[in-house]
């Protein structure tokens, strides 16, 4: 709400202090039209947010949501431009103390123009970038993996965020691209939706088409809790053939060897699906080769001290909009791809969808295909 008020105030200031003072009437008209359009887009943004929280049926406002949430990306880059202009203004004032005749206005006008064009350009590029998740391949060699099990091909799907903008067609596309890779196992690391089962439950119907001989498993992310419908979502997963790992584990057997898949609820989860690591590890052989699934890479700290061999996660979106990646790294121990958390390898997917703006800049969406292999030594080699 604060961002909404500030943005509307800034638009009013632009109209009052800038546009209405332009000497050319056609320019004033064009400027006023632009301010009005920006105001309408600003008012559309909270519609998308409310739809993501289950307060409004997304199907009724999908285009409004898409327009308003996309505009938020442009606003973000315009704010960055304002910050740069503010720094230039301060530097200009300081320069005038040394050179009284210094005029920094021409440079600021150029920066403002570049910033506006850049904000619009980055948003348009990000819309295209976010539309189709790319399939990435990473080989992970683990000395602790039983060689008899053979290579394990894992499809990691996270952060679909079906709801305000992404619908059933988008989910179907992710399923089709995943099946084309012929994975042995599909792991889904949360934030599959934004909304309630009653409103968008049908959007996850394509998950029924996922094909993996060793199973399809899912854990909750923080967004499963936002609409207060987590119990129904976990049941919806079962309805479409996905096995929830709600603080639970599953044993996979092949070639006379065993791999344990362990899932923990999101660390911000609420009852009756709050995180419970003791329950997740109940009955798990401490010596077993274990792959943990949890929404945040931050949860890897709990897994590492319990001897897990590998964690897969999502949540970070790889930053989604550059330069957010640098802020994410202040809160999470891993950002994207194969990294280490307290000595344990963690693969963090950038996610297939997007939250808020359906825009990605510098963080392309992905469906991660991980090939786990036994190794005599523990090198991990992304490719």
Image (cartoon, helix red, strand yellow):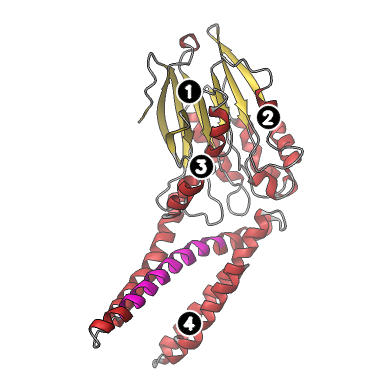
Position of residue 366 measured from the top left corner of the image (x, y, whole percent): 46, 40
Residue 214 appears in view: no
Q: Which residues are magenta?
A: 69-92
Instruction: Give the residue at x 63% y 64%.
Output: 46
Sequence-wise first label, 4 or 3: 4
Disc 4 is placed on an element classified as helix
Pointer 2: residues within 10 angstroms few (<14), some, or many (20+)? many
Disc 4 marks which residue? 14
**Relative image position of residue 152 (x, y in whole percent):** 48, 19
The residue that disc 1 covers is: 153
In the picture shown, does residue 49 fall above or below 244? below
Q: Nearer the viewer, mark 3 or mark 2?
A: 2
Q: From mark 1 to mark 3, how far is it between C-alphas?
A: 18 Å
Whole-Å distance between the Cαs marked 4 and 3?
37 Å
Task: Kindly state the secondary structure of the residue where label 1 is placed.
Answer: strand
The residue indicated by pointer 2 is 247
- The Cα atoms of the two marked residues, 1 and 2, are separated by 23 Å
Cα gap from disc 2 to disc 4, whole angstroms:
52 Å
Tell me if residue 334 can be seen: yes
Mark carried by residue 28: none
Q: Give whichever of 7, 60 is nearer the camera.
A: 7
Q: Which mark is residue 351?
A: 3
Q: Residue at x 60, y 73 (%)?
A: 5
Q: Nearer the viewer, residue 101 or 63?
A: 101
- Looking at the image, which residue is at 74% across and 48% down? 228
């Amino acid at each position: 709400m604060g961002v909404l008020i500030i943005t509307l105030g800034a638009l009013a200031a632009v109209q009052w202090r800038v546009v209405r003072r332009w000497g050319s009437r056609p320019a004033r008209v064009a400027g006023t039209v632009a301010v009005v359009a920006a105001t309408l887009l600003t008012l559309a943004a909270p519609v998308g947010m409310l739809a993501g929280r289950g307060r409004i049926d997304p199907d009724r406002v999908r285009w409004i949501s898409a327009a308003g949430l996309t505009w938020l990306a442009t606003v973000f880059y315009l704010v960055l431009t304002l910050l740069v202009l503010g720094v230039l203004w301060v530097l200009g004032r300081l320069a005038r103390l040394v050179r009284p005749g210094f005029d920094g206005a021409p440079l600021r006008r150029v920066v403002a123009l570049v910033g506006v064009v850049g904000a619009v350009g980055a948003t348009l590029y990000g819309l295209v970038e976010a539309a189709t998740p790319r399939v990435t391949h990473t080989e992970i060699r683990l000395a602790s993996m039983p060689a008899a099990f053979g290579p394990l091909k894992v499809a990691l799907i996270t952060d679909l965020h079906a709801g305000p903008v992404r619908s059933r067609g988008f989910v179907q596309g992710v399923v089709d691209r995943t099946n084309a890779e012929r994975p042995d196992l599909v792991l889904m690391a949360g934030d599959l939706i934004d909304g309630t089962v009653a409103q968008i439950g049908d959007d996850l119907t394509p998950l029924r088409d996922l094909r993996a001989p060793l199973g399809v498993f899912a854990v909750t992310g923080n967004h499963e809790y936002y609409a207060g419908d987590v119990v129904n979502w976990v049941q919806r997963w079962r309805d479409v053939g996905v096995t929830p790992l709600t603080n639970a584990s599953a044993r996979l057997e092949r070639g006379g060897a065993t791999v344990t898949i362990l899932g923990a609820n999101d660390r911000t989860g609420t009852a009756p699906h709050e995180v419970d690591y003791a329950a997740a590890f109940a009955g798990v052989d401490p010596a077993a080769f274990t792959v943990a699934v949890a929404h945040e890479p931050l949860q890897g700290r709990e897994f590492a001290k319990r001897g897990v061999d590998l964690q897969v996660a999502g949540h970070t979106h790889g930053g989604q909009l550059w330069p957010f990646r640098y802020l994410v790294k202040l809160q999470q121990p891993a950002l994207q791809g194969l990294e280490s958390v307290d000595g344990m390898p963690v693969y963090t997917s950038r996610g297939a969808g997007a939250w808020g703006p359906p825009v990605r800049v510098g963080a392309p969406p992905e469906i991660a295909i991980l090939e786990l292999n036994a190794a005599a030594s523990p090198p991990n080699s992304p490719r």
